Image (tube, grey):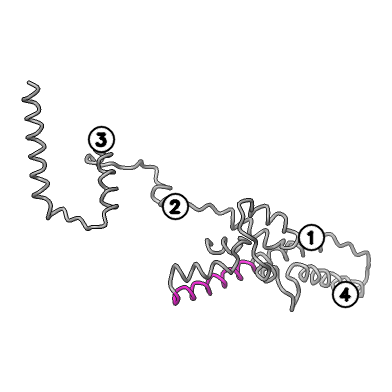
Amino acid sequence: MIFLASILDPRNKLDYVPFVIVRMFGEKEGKKLILEVKIYMDSLFDYYVKKKSKGSTSASSGNTTITVSGYGSFLKRGTMRTKLQSEKHKEVTGGLGAKSELDRYLAEDIEPETNEFKILNWWKINEPRFSILAEMACDVLAIPISSVTSECAFSTRGRILDSFRSSLTPKLVQSLICLQDWLRGEHISTKVEEDLEYLEQLKLDLANCAKYSTIIDI
């Protein structure tokens, strides 16, 4: 659904998504995933086509009034109703041999990337041309996406902090964050085991300095 939402973005379509999939999953797995995305997109579009066609057929049969009687007129009435349903179906699907909304949408050029572009406004403006796709885009783009884990999202329990984490003072936390930043910025690998003796000696020197300064103050 994430890839489908990107395809329904007129700035991306199928020009961008296959490139990203191959880059993320590799050539072999990427091609398989691209095919699966296309198959799923076609099946979802067919679902909306049938949904639209069913609604149009019900509306047309309900609004049609035929004032004829007799057996011959009964057959004529059935034929007319079938023709009306056929016309509505052609109107929705584009008819046999014609490009569907999805094909026409993907065949058009992508929209330029600008800060002023609003995807929902674009679909609202182009709804007369892509009525089925606009409905599908409205449903797909309305799906909320969150990076929060399911345990945090649905659990009523609070976050559990052990005694060690809850005992960290603000000064110690700041020191740990600063040290972590230094370690990540170092290009030379740091091995604590090898420097442990030096660190212990440094700790003793600092303690002796503190005692010496205390004696001087006294």
Q: Position of residue 34 (x, y in %)?
A: 52, 72
Q: Whole-Å distance between the Cαs marked 3 and 1?
A: 71 Å
Q: Write the start and end of the magenta stretch as one range.
A: 27-46
Q: Name the N-terminal-most of marks 3 and 1.
A: 1
Secondary structure under tag 3 reads helix
**On residue 171, which mark appears?**
3
Label 1 belongs to which residue? 59
Q: Earlier in the sequence, mark 4 or mark 3?
A: 4
Question: Magenta stretch: residue 99 in it?
Answer: no
- Name the residue tied to disc 4: 75
Q: Quick check: 139 left or right of 84?
A: left
Quarter-of-image position of residue 111: bottom right
**Which amino acid does the dot numbered 4 rest on?**
Leu
Cα distance in 3D space between marks 1 and 2: 42 Å
In the picture, the quarter occupied by the C terminus is top left
Residue at image location 63% in from the left, 62% down from the top: 10
Which of 85 and 90 lies nearest the eye of the viewer? 90
Q: Which residue position is annotated with label 2?
A: 147
Calculate the distance from the C-alpha at mark 4 to the C-alpha at mark 1.
21 Å
Along the polypeptide, which appears first: circle 2 or circle 4?
4
Q: Secondary structure at mark 2?
A: loop
Q: Earlier in the sequence, mark 1 or mark 2?
A: 1
The local crowd at label 4, few if under 14, some if 14 to 19, many if 20 or more residues have their Cα within 10 Å, is few
Image-quadrant location for residue 58: bottom right
- Image coords of residue 150 (percent x, y): 41, 52
Residue that protrudes farthest toward the front in the picture: 216
Q: Which SS class for mark 1?
A: helix
| Three-letter code, disc 3 | Lys
Of marks 3 and 1, the one in the foreground? 3
